Image (cartoon, rainbow, N blue to C red):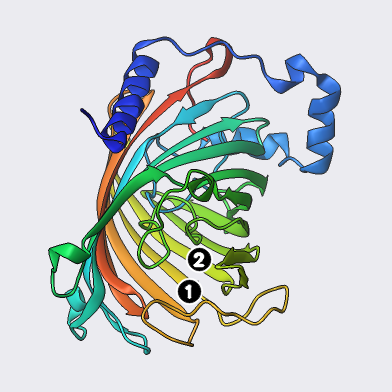
Amino acid sequence: MLSAGHRYIGVIFFCTVVTIASPGPSWADLDDISPSLYNLVNRIFRPAPEEDIAKYRRRWNPFAAGPMLNPAIDIQPKGQTVVHPYVFGEIGHMRSGNQLTAGNFFGGPSNDSPFHLNASLFLLPIEYGLTDSLEVDIAFSWVDWFATQQNFDQNSTRNANGLGDTTIFMKHRPIIQDHDTWRPSVTFYHSISLPSSDWANTTGIPGGFAPFGRLPSTRFGDLEFTEGIMMRKNIRPFRFEAAAYYSYGTPGSKDGMNTYGGDLVNWRLSMEHVLDDSKGFGYIIEVVGLHGLGWRLDGHSINIPAPGQTSNPTFSMIGVQPSFEYKFSNNIVIAGGVLFTVASQNQIDAVYPNFTLYYYWGSKGRPVIMR
């Protein structure tokens, strides 16, 4: 009999195949359904000037996957949808101490981790362009992990799989880059991470975080709110991106007591080099960071220490990922890469292989266009 994890992977694969094999649905745009609601959305989330959008779409911006470890900074055009299942892995047997040091792969100290972890995160984001400046999204996840203790005592082996956390987010791009000046595109990110893993009684991953993935990292099983700002600039044949995110987690509870974890900061930097515009073929170098802070916005004292610590709540992870991208058609692109831990503090020293497939379709039979 198939395990729950294998069944879930099968469902994702089946849905992806059916979606690709069938024509895109002719969904109505929001302004067709309710012009007054469409106008209200545009008043709340100020759209970029139409002339800027039109100019941007005429300039160099080839259809390609883009960075793996950051939500796309550009917005799906109005009515356009993308579904892109991801597989993120994590393999780590070493950990860093109480000081920020180089990762083991880069010559850092070899400290054995309290747990040896092999984990997978299956992420399924669905993104829809509500307007040309506002995108609404949801991302479902499934986790599967296996861990042993340092001594590889089989009696201490632990493994689990189940529903992960669910993220609902929006991206608002009020500023579009100008190819003739240094003005970049600017996008604001707003999200809520729902503790669906906790609702499904999924056993938490050792260390408290699912494998590093597409969205800003949050504590597994916590209700968290994230705000971020993202920027992008195209300078042919390169595309440069930067982003920073701040996450606040609501208080939790354990053994009848309230728990308070520190707020989180995620950041991303990337350089994409498109080698073949027509095939969307290129490579991307991404640098990512995750930092657990020693404070909370609500002022509560933190009582959740960093992994391996009894009192210090702060931790950091900095990684670098080379990845590739390729376009199969005007609807399908793929990307894959491996993230390596460059430096860390109070965190597992891991590598993160990952892969994704993007499938796009336009609204009402319109062709897919680059954002």
Quick one: 341 or 298, which is closer to the camera? 298
Measured from the top left, where is residue 292 in percent x and y? 50, 75
Q: Quadrant of the N terminus?
A: top left
* Quarter of the view holding residue 282: top left
* Mark 2 residue element: strand
Whether residue 113 is visible, yes or no, is: yes
Circle 1 packing at 10 Å, graded few (<14), some (14-19), many (20+), is: many
Please give the residue where the numbered disc 1 appears in the rendered image: 291
Quick one: 149 or 33, which is closer to the camera? 149
Q: Identify the mark nearer the N-term, 1 or 2.
A: 2
Measured from the top left, where is residue 71 in percent x and y? 49, 48
Measured from the top left, where is residue 301 in percent x and y? 65, 82
Circle 2 packing at 10 Å, graded few (<14), some (14-19), many (20+), is: many
211 lies above or below 8: below
Quick one: 76 or 219, which is closer to the camera? 219
Could you give the CA–CA distance between mark 1 and mark 2, rounded to whole angstroms? 7 Å
* Mark 1 residue element: strand
Measured from the top left, where is residue 121 in percent x and y? 35, 48
Whether residue 119 is visible, yes or no, is: no
Taking the spot 54% from the left edge, 45% from the top edge, the residue there is: 199
Taking the spot 80% from the left edge, 19% from the top edge, the residue there is: 34
Quick one: 226 or 243, which is closer to the camera? 226
- As drawn, is 111 to the left or to the right of 187? left
Q: Amino acid at mark 2?
A: Asn
159 lies above or below 345: above
Please give the residue where the numbered disc 2 appears in the rendered image: 266
- As drawn, is 152 to the left or to the right of 349? left
Q: Amino acid at mark 1?
A: His
Taking the spot 58% from the left edge, 30% from the top edge, the residue there is: 128
123 lies above or below 147: above
Asked if marks 1 and 2 touch (Cβ < 8 Å), the reply is yes
